């Protein structure tokens, strides 16, 4: 059964997120006179309540921003940091995944605080009020959230606060049940009363540090006193046919998206038609080779723009990859059969635009589903498990697990412009699937001319650098799946609208001063919707 992408249009701005109530809260903030930055802060806090398995104040946030007044694009790097007290001599053989020892310094609260203080217009208590109310009155458990609780219940039950809130008689809350999070409401009320810095140098910080000491976490007051103020960085820029692409540089994964588009633009649009076997095969090979490049060429975000050699975004490098793909598929010799060749996290994304022309695209996360599977005692938010997102073996790697180092990230919030005018903003969760997901949506929207909701709802796949291909199996015909097998891919079947294959939240922006409609589209793969001010 086909699904429609929930969409909505408005002349005064738009919010598209993975939670209907969070989108509505953002629209209400825009309605009340707030700008996109105000709405972004309110939506971020609300998502931590209504989509707790994917993000929250215990994690980190990244944004791509267009500031209309200055006509300026920039990214806001809200990375978290490894604890000072962590000893590199004790790096384990496998990543730390569960418990407070897997948690890096939460940076989202500082990110929201900086965003509101620098670019917002409404008081913090106004922006927090809807999320506090949501936590106190409760949100309905959706089938998606129920499934996440059920799959992770063994670890979740080891935390008494989670057991009390997310289970009833030791059974996961069922779809339609109400999830009340009073401890989280209390935490956000403290932020509203004392200011966001209380999270780092006040009552909240003291509570977290005591919890860390009691339950063997690494974070201490020294970590919190170094408030993780986000860094404004220049965006990564590329192009695709007649469009310009603005996306997230390291530590994010915009390089992957730029390289994929550089490769695919060298083929005629009809050749990479995602509704045909050949188009899917070309994309699959591009995904495989590009992800291999990213793994081989990590970049230090503090040095990236000073480096001369930026191979992944170089169109000449993409030309070489294109020629490799041609040889593999027998592109020049159509009579030749394609030869066989030898050959992981959870997040949320939302996009916002306002009547002033500002654009905010934020990808935020607690890393894996339910993060460290533990909540902060008496504060209610899930701790992240970003200690798992570092390099554990190669000490020369820019993301090796060292004190105060930032984790590697796959985020790629993106804005597409045409003749210098932003026409589309989009992003997705999904770890390394983020860039491959966005590529498929952009090919359908820009090359095939498909409506945005149709491009987002269309079937997707993902390939790894090791040639494993994951696809929404029931929605691909045998010709397409067959050509994957013939060229050496091992197939893994996912559901028709797979949670695993991303969740795009996008806004189609006005293309001229005379056309003022903002159209938001939420991915049908999760619980989202789009909402705009009245």
Image (spheres, rainbow, N blue to C red):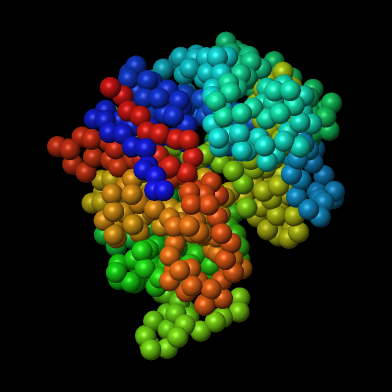
User: Would you say residue 132 is visible in this rendering?
Assistant: no
The residue that appears at 40% across and 70% down in the rendered structure is 277
Q: Is residue 17 left or right of residue 243?
A: right
Closer-to-camera residue (236/264) = 264
The residue that appears at 48% across and 72% down in the rendered structure is 482
Q: Is residue 333 left or right of residue 110?
A: left
Residue 137 percent coordinates (x, y): 55, 14
Task: Please tell me how many numbered marks the rendered image carries.
Answer: 0
User: Would you say residue 150 is visible in this rendering?
Assistant: yes
Q: Is residue 76 left or right of residue 394?
A: left
Vertically, is 67 above or below 466? above
Residue 203 percent coordinates (x, y): 69, 15
For the C terminus, the quadrant is top left
Vertically, is 391 above or below 217? below
The residue that appears at 54% across and 31% down in the rendered structure is 142
The residue most toward the left is 514
Residue 359 percent coordinates (x, y): 36, 36
The residue that appears at 62% across and 46% down in the rendered structure is 345
The residue most toward the top is 193
Task: Examine the image and state in which quarter residue 86 appears.
Answer: top right
Closer-to-camera residue (431/203) = 431
Task: Examine the image and state in which quarter residue 186 appears.
Answer: top right
Residue 115 percent coordinates (x, y): 47, 29
């Amino acid at each position: 059964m086909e699904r429609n992408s929930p969409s909505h249009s408005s002349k005064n701005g738009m919010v598209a997120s993975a939670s209907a109530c969070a989108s509505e809260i953002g629209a209400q903030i825009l309605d009340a006179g707030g700008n996109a930055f105000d709405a972004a802060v309110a939506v971020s806090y609300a998502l931590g309540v209504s989509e707790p398995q994917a993000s929250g104040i215990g994690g980190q946030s990244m944004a791509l921003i267009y500031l209309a007044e200055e006509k300026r694009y920039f990214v806001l790097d809200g990375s978290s940091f490894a604890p000072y007290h962590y000893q590199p001599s004790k790096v384990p053989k496998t990543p730390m995944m569960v418990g407070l020892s897997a948690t890096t310094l939460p940076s989202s609260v500082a990110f929201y605080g900086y965003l509101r203080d620098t670019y917002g217009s409404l008081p913090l208590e106004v922006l927090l009020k809807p999320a506090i109310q949501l936590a106190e009155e409760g949100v309905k458990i959706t089938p998606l959230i129920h499934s996440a609780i059920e799959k992770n219940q063994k670890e979740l039950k080891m935390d008494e606060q989670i057991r009390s809130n997310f289970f009833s008689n030791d059974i996961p809350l069922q779809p339609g049940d109400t999830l009340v999070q009073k401890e989280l409401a209390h935490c956000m009320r403290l932020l509203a009363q004392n200011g966001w810095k209380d999270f780092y140098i006040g009552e909240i910080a003291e509570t977290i540090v005591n919890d860390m000491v009691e339950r063997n976490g690494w974070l201490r007051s020294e970590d919190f006193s170094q408030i993780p103020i986000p860094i404004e960085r220049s965006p990564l820029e590329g192009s695709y046919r007649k469009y310009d692409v603005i996306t997230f540089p390291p530590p994010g994964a915009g390089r992957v998206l730029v390289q994929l588009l550089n490769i695919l633009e060298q083929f005629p649009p009809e050749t990479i038609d995602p509704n045909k076997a050949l188009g899917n095969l070309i994309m699959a090979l591009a995904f495989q080779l590009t992800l291999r490049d990213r793994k081989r060429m990590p970049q230090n975000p503090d040095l990236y723009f000073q480096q001369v050699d930026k191979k992944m975004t170089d169109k000449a490098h993409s030309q070489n990859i294109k020629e490799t793909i041609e040889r593999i598929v027998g592109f020049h010799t159509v009579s030749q059969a394609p030869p066989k060749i030898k050959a992981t996290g959870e997040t949320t994304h939302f996009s916002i635009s306002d009547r002033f022309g500002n654009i905010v695209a934020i990808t935020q996360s607690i890393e894996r589903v339910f993060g460290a599977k533990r909540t902060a005692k008496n504060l209610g938010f899930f701790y992240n498990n970003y200690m798992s997102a570092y390099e554990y073996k190669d000490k020369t790697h820019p993301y090796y697990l060292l004190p105060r180092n930032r984790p590697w990230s796959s985020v790629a919030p993106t804005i597409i412009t045409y003749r210098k005018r932003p026409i589309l903003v989009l992003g997705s969760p999904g770890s390394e699937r983020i860039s491959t997901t966005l590529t498929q949506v952009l090919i359908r929207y820009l090359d095939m001319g498909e409506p945005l909701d149709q491009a987002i709802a269309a079937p997707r796949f993902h390939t790894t650098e090791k040639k494993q291909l994951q696809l929404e199996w029931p929605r691909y015909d045998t010709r397409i799946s067959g050509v994957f097998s013939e060229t050496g891919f091992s197939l893994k079947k996912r559901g028709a609208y797979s949670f695993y294959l991303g969740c795009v939240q996008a806004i189609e922006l006005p293309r001229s001063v005379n056309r003022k409609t903002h159209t938001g589209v939420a991915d049908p793969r999760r619980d989202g919707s789009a909402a705009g001010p009245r």
